Every structure is written in C-alpha cells, then in structure tokens.
Image: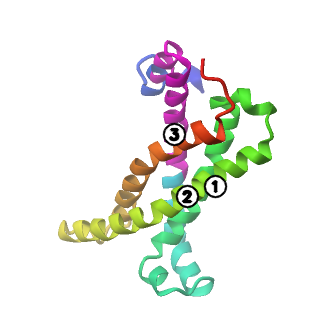
Amino acid sequence: MLSTLTDSTPVVKLLTLARRQPVEIKRFIKFLIVGAFGFAVDFGGFNLFHWLGVGPWVAANLLPLEALRTHPEIVEQTLSFCAAVLSNFLWNYLWIYPEARDANQAKKITKFALVSIVGLVLGVPIFSVALTAAKSLVAAMGLSTLQFNLAGNLALVCRVGVLLFWNFFVNRYWTYRDVGRK
C-alpha cells in the first residue's frame, strides 16, 4: 500500500517529518495519523449506523428515552465512538507505544478505556449542543433533505476537535506514563 503513495501525499510528508523530530513530537505526529484513521472509523461507523437506522431502532426498542427518539444520532455517535476507541488502542499498542508491549495490557486497555469513557462523557454534551446548532444551520441553508447527515457530521467534527487534545495528553501522561521520554 505504501508503494502506491507518492512523495507528495500528506501521509508521506507527515511520516517524513516525524522521522526528523524528537521522540515526543514523533509520538504526537503518529497520534495525529492514528487519530485520522480513528476519525475515519468514527465517521464511517456513524454514517453506516445512520444509513442502517440503528439510532431510531435502539431508541424505539432498547433504550426508549425521549432524548434518543428526538436525537437518535446520539446512539449512532456512541457506537461509532466505541469502534474508533478500539481501533485507536490497537494502533497505540502496535505503533505509537511499542515499548509498552511488555506492560500489563489489561491495565493499559482499562486506563485507555477510562480516558475514552470520560472523553465520551465530555463528548456527548459537546456533540448534542453542536448537533442542535448544526441542525438549525443546515435547515437555514435548505440542506435538511440531504441523504447525508450533514448536521450529525458537523457535530462530530466539533466533538473530535475538542477531544483530540484530551485523549493525547491524558493517555500520554497517565496510560503510557511508564514509556520513556527521550
């Protein structure tokens, strides 16, 4: 796959830049790349769940809460977020913090999951407020009839932007604090 990338692609430029940086900057650049992949998992999952009607089904059958009936995107966002967390943990394990492979992985994934759950707790209100604003904006622009859930995706961008820094710094200094900082 890497052989199909040219020297001018953003990923190749970012990887080249990363090789020339101190360790912690390299980690942050790798984190951004993993985050971009997690972003794709999150957005792809969100749109797939939305297309499949998972949110309305869950709101009607499993969690019959009024808030979920009026905003089924919250269910879809939560599920896609969980998929992204699992993906990101795997890439952290394999690529960003390979030195931590000898550590207790149950403890690491527990910490990573706790950071992610707090991120979800912080992210749901951010997503909900952004979703309300985005729905109004999309309606005002006359784009409410799009098959693509524009408002939901705009709200996801807001949530991801806020949680990017939370996830990196808390995982770096709590979950992976035992990994050296050369």
Snapshot quadrant of residue 156? bottom left
Mark 3 neighbour class, 10 Å CA radius: few under 14, some 14 to 19, many 20 or more? few
* Residue 78 pos. (x, y %): 54, 64
Q: Is residue 9 above or below residue 104?
A: above
In the image: residue 129, left or right of residue 138:
right
Check disc 1 and report the residue beneath it: 114
**Residue type at numbered disc 2:** Val
Q: How is the image coloured?
A: rainbow
Along the line of sight, the residue nearer the viewer: 112 or 46:
112
Per the image, label 1 sits on a secondary structure element best described as helix
Question: What distance separates the C-alpha of mark 3 from that of mark 1?
Answer: 14 Å
**Residue type at numbered disc 1:** Leu
* Residue 182 pos. (x, y %): 60, 17
The disc, 3 or 1, on the residue closer to the chain's N-terminal end is 1
* Magenta-drawn stretch contains 29: yes
- Residue 6 visible in image: no
Provide the residue span drawn in magenta: 14-41
Residue 118 - label: 2
What residue do we see at 34% from left, 67% from top? 129
Per the image, label 3 sits on a secondary structure element best described as helix
Residue 169 - label: 3
Per the image, label 2 sits on a secondary structure element best described as helix
Snapshot quadrant of residue 144? bottom left
Are the residues tagged 1 and 2 within 8 Å (C-beta)?
A: yes
